[in-house]
């Protein structure tokens, strides 16, 4: 159940994002937004891996088909 690890990080950085938005701190706002996005992507990937769906294989096949299309 590793997919639950980023949830507390998302909540903490959502609070940091809101506070930095309120006080006008653009550096903390950008950093927290990037960390939130990365944690959400990791959450989705880990949850799908937990359910037995390896999305990495489909992404690689999709990229390879795009490369073959443009050759």
Image (cartoon, helix red, strand yellow):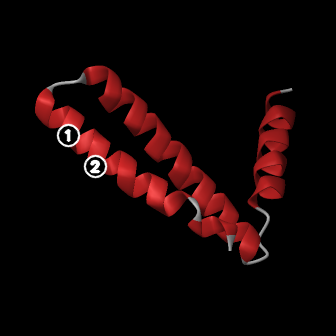
Image height of 63 relative to 1, above or below: above
- Reading the image, the residue beneath label 2 is 15
- Which residue in the protein does label 1 denote? 19
Question: In this rendering, would 22 be left or right of 64?
Answer: left
- Location of the C terminus by quadrant is top right
Q: 54 or 19: nearer the eye?
A: 19
Q: Residue at x 78, y 41 (%)?
A: 63
Q: Which mark is residue 57?
A: none
Tell me: 68 left or right of 39: right
Q: Quadrant of residue 55?
A: bottom right
Q: Alpha-carbon neighbours of circle 2 within 10 Å: few (<14), some, or many (≥20)? A: few
Mark 1 and mark 2: Cα distance apart in space: 6 Å
For label 1, the crowd category at 10 Å Cα-Cα, with few meaning under 14, some 14 to 19 and many 20 or more, is some
Q: Position of residue 54 (x, y in %)?
A: 79, 64
Q: Position of residue 32 (x, y in %)?
A: 39, 37
Q: Secondary structure at mark 2?
A: helix
- The quarter of the picture where residue 22 lies is top left
């Amino acid at each position: 159940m590793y997919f639950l690890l980023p949830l507390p990080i998302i909540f903490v950085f959502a609070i940091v994002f809101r506070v930095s938005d309120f006080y006008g701190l653009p550096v903390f706002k950008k950093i927290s937004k990037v960390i939130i996005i990365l944690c959400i992507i990791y959450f989705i990937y880990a949850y799908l891996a937990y359910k037995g769906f390896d999305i990495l294989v489909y992404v690689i096949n999709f990229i390879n088909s795009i490369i073959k299309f443009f050759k």
